């Protein structure tokens, strides 16, 4: 049927568009100009995170944030706090601005550097919603209906309670990515299906209207792609579904971290050994330990052979406390200077807008939308 082929898959990788530097606030010193030119010659990454809680958690940190920090040195990196995604579920307008700042402050606290990446708030760059509309017009209804995260989230409160925004959420996410011609997208495993949709939409648009978008690839690290709930090690650690005891927050007080790890569900027996089937709790803790310390799991198994869960959990708790303490402190300092933080975000939005507006000019042109006379 004609309509279905309208939503068929396409091919053809394309060259990246829109790699120009920001005109509004050009780098000022020779060092900065050099750094910006170097960044532009690199592949690009983009990722986003929702400001839906008062703190990010250990799953966000290991699954996404750490990669964001690492990639800013080898990629031209764009990162956004996706506040428009955060309003797809009921939310409190009195909390959102604070949570948006807390999210940005934690990203900086974890090591993002505004001189080495572009950090901004999604709603500050209006092209995101414009492109989302356009991509919605080339997305099949059935295709959008297959997104498992929508099915899970809407099943929770009943279908009638779910907003259309929650349904089209992955299309806005595709717009976030495609606007910046991102080559790679660092995320946790739960985002894989959304990234496949982004890639499909890029290829479909290119096929139908001419080469416009880079089809993005996921950047997902197996060892940390899915960190599990400490109280239910068969479920993902998640701010919406885990109990407070099941989640370790980046901004938790040290004693709260120690308590949660001490009470983490372990498995029958006392052997510290990775076995996802028989010992999901211990395996999750070993993965967290290994990711934070850099020691392979086999080394940790040997280190704790015969010592039981108690010592192992105590050491892990201290490792998490030591990893999060500097982030917590830096986040606190950044939040103490709200005006400074807002300036960093305004600068990021100006830089992002430069790239996004070039992509949108190409999109409008390729689609046949009449350009206004300047
Ligand atoms: P969200 O909290 O849903 O906005 O997710 C932000 C980022 O953290 C995304 O890249 C997710 O894939 C990642 N993420 C969320 N929960 C986990 C988890 N339990 N394990 C690994 N990555 C996660
Ligand atoms: N959907 C992502 C999540 O829940 C957040 C997100 C929005 C995102 N836009 C993005 C992630 C673009 C990567 C790229 O975690």
Image: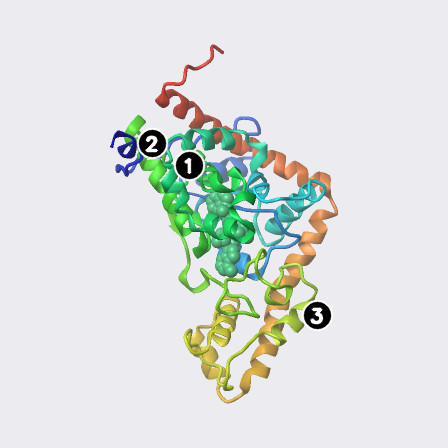
Camera-near label (2 vs 1) is 2
Q: Secondary structure at mark 1?
A: helix
Q: Which mark is residue 178?
A: 1
Residue 335 spot, x, y in % from top left = 71, 47
Q: Which of pointers 2 and 1 lies earlier in the amino acid sequence?
A: 1
Residue 17 spot, x, y in % from top left = 38, 31
Residue lying farthest bottom? Answer: 306
Task: Identify which residue is drawn at 69% across, 68% down.
Answer: 256
Q: Secondary structure at mark 3?
A: helix
Kindly check if marks 2 and 1 are in contact, taking CB atoms under 8 A apart as contact: yes
Q: Is mark 3 within 8 Å of ligand 1?
A: no
Question: What whole-number distance in Å separates the C-alpha atoms at marks 2 and 1?
Answer: 11 Å
Task: Identify which residue is drawn at 55% across, 31% down.
Answer: 125
Q: How is the image coloured?
A: rainbow
**Does 63 sit left or right of 366 as displayed?**
right
Question: What whole-number distance in Å separates the C-alpha atoms at marks 3 and 1?
Answer: 42 Å
The residue carrying pointer 3 sits among few (fewer than 14), some (14 to 19) or many (20 or more) residues within 10 Å by Cα, namely: few
Residue lying farthest top? Answer: 373
Q: Which of pointers 3 and 1 lies earlier in the amino acid sequence?
A: 1
Q: Which mark is residue 114?
A: none
Residue to which mark 3 is pinned: 255
**Is residue 37 something one can see in this rendering?**
yes
Question: What whole-number distance in Å separates the C-alpha atoms at marks 2 and 3?
Answer: 51 Å
114 or 51: nearer the viewer: 51
Task: Identify which residue is drawn at 59% across, 83% down.
Answer: 310
Task: Identify which residue is drawn at 67% across, 42% down.
Answer: 96
Residue to which mark 2 is pinned: 205
| Vertical relation: 24 (above or below) 320 | above
């Amino acid at each position: 049927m004609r309509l279905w082929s309208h939503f068929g898959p396409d091919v053809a990788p394309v060259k990246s568009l829109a790699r120009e530097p920001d005109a509004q606030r050009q780098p000022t010193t020779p060092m900065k100009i050099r750094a910006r030119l170097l960044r532009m010659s690199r592949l690009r990454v983009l990722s986003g995170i929702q400001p839906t809680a008062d703190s990010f958690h250990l799953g966000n940190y290991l699954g996404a944030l750490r990669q964001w920090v690492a990639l800013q040195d080898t990629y031209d990196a764009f990162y956004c706090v996706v506040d428009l995604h955060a309003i797809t579920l009921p939310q409190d307008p009195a909390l959102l601005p604070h949570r948006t700042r807390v999210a940005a402050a934690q990203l900086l606290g974890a090591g993002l550097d505004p001189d080495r990446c572009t950090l901004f708030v999604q709603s500050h760059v209006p092209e995101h919603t414009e492109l989302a509309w356009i991509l919605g017009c080339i997305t099949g209804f059935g295709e959008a209906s297959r997104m498992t995260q929508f099915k899970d989230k809407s099943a929770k409160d009943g279908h009638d309670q779910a907003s259309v925004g929650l349904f089209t959420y992955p299309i806005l996410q595709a717009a976030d990515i495609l606007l910046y011609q991102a080559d790679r997208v660092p995320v946790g495993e739960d985002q894989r299906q959304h990234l496949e949709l982004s890639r499909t939409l890029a290829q479909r648009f290119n096929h139908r209207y001419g080469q416009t978008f880079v089809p993005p690839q996921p950047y997902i690290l197996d060892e940390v792609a899915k960190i599990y709930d400490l109280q239910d090690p068969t479920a993902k650690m998640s701010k919406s579904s885990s109990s407070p005891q099941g989640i370790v927050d980046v901004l938790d007080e040290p004693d709260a971290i120690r308590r949660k790890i001490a009470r983490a569900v372990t498995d029958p027996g006392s052997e510290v050994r990775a076995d996802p089937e028989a010992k999901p709790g211990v395996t999750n803790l070993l993965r967290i330990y290994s990711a934070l310390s850099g020691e392979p799991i086999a080394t940790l198994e040997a280190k704790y052979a015969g010592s039981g869960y108690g010592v192992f959990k105590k050491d892990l708790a201290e490792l998490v406390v030591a990893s999060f303490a500097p982030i917590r402190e830096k986040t606190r300092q950044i939040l103490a200077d709200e005006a400074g933080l807002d300036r960093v975000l305004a600068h990021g939005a100006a830089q992002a807008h430069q790239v996004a507006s070039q992509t949108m000019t190409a999109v409008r042109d390729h689609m046949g939308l009449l350009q206004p006379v300047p």
